[in-house]
Amino acid sequence: VMNGEAVKFAYLGSFIPAIKATAMLELDDVDASTIKAFRCRFYPSPEFKRSLSKTGFAEANLEIKGLQ
C-alpha cells in the first residue's frame, strides 16, 4: 500500500490506496505539496461479506474476574 499498489488478502479482501490532490497542468508541477489527503480503502471479498452476513452475536459476561 505504501508504494501505491493494491494489497489483496485472499479471503479478507483488498486494501487500495487513494489520494486527493490538486490538479496540475504540467507533470513538473506535481510534488508532495499537491497531495491533500491520503487514505486506504478496504474492499471485502465476496466470501468475507457472505460470512459476515451469517455471523451471529451473543451477549457476553463482562464481569472481570481475577486480579484487580
Image: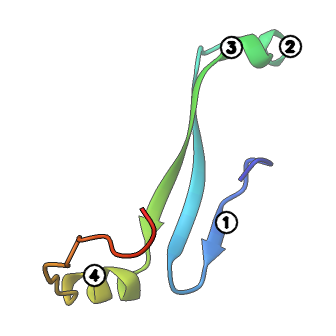
Local packing at callout 1 (Cα closer than 10 Å; few below 14, some 14-19, many 20+) is some
Mark 1 and mark 2 in contact? Answer it, CB < 8 Å: no
Q: Amino acid at mark 3?
A: Thr
Local packing at callout 3 (Cα closer than 10 Å; few below 14, some 14-19, many 20+) is few
Q: Which tag, 2 or 3, sits closer to the chain's start? A: 2
Q: Where does the image place residue 35, in percent across and percent down from the top left?
A: 65, 20
Q: Where does the image place residue 43, in percent across and percent down from the top left?
A: 44, 64
Residue furthest to the right: 28
Q: Which tag, 4 or 1, sits closer to the chain's start? A: 1
Would you name the residue on which mark 2 appears? 28
Q: CA distance from mark 3 to mark 1?
A: 25 Å
Residue closest to the eye, 14 or 61: 61
Q: Which corner quadrant of the image does residue 62 belong to?
A: bottom left
Would you name the residue on which mark 4 appears? 52
Q: Report the mark closest to the observer, 4 or 1.
A: 4
Which numbered dot is residue 34?
3
Q: Which corner quadrant of the image does residue 54 belong to?
A: bottom left
